[in-house]
Image (tube, rainbow, N blue to C red):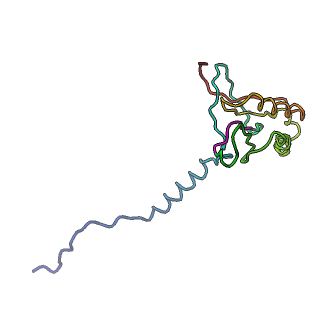
Amino acid sequence: MSKFSKKKKGMPAINTASLPDIVFMLLFFFMVATTMRETSVMVKQQLPTATEVKKLEDKRLISTIYVGEAEDQKKYGEGDKIQLNDKIADVSQVRNFIFSQREPIPEDERDYMTTLIKADIKSNVGTINDIKKELREINALKVTYSTNIGVEK
């Protein structure tokens, strides 16, 4: 008879000591890599196509105005609506929107501020002309239009 008995060899337990480190590393990665959506678009957006397009460089100097029919027509009614930040607005509120966008920008860079109009392809030209007229009155003369790259149909 032997003095020593043989121990049963089974499957060793999985070491989970490094699991919290991996979870926190993934959490920090997604926190750093993820950008928050600034605005949620509440108007229909089917952009027109154009062949000559240019990408805007400095996005912090861009103020975006959305134009199109409201997604929720029961709440906002029919016809073209203007969206400034996260709310549906009137043409008369464009002026205050541009002034509020200018405030945080340093004074020497305010001349480079651009107003981007993202208008639906079915938007009324009169609505866009009203916005342009309002922008002209407050001397916000750099206006660009957002389009998709493509060939006109």
> Residue 59: image x %, image y %?
72, 37
> Residue 90: image x %, image y %?
80, 42
Q: Quadrant of residue 120?
A: top right
Q: Quadrant of residue 2?
A: bottom left
> Residue 113: image x %, image y %?
81, 35
> Residue 7: image x %, image y %?
21, 74
User: Does the magenta-highlighted stretch encompass residue 69?
Assistant: yes
Above or below — where is 65 with respect to 142?
below
- Looking at the rendered image, the quarter that the C terminus falls into is top right
Above or below — where is 39 with respect to 124?
below
User: Does the magenta-highlighted stretch encompass residue 16?
Assistant: no
Residue under the point 35% across and 64% down:
14
Residue under the point 85% across and 36% down:
110
Residue under the point 78% across and 29% down:
126
Q: Camera-side residue: 117 or 7?
A: 117
- Please name the predominant secondary structure of the magenta segment in the image: strand
Above or below — where is 84 with respect to 123?
below
Residue under the point 30% across and 66% down:
12
- Looking at the rendered image, the quarter that the N terminus falls into is bottom left
Relative to 6, 90 lies left or right: right
Direction left: furthest residue: 1
Q: Which residues are magenta?
A: 64-71
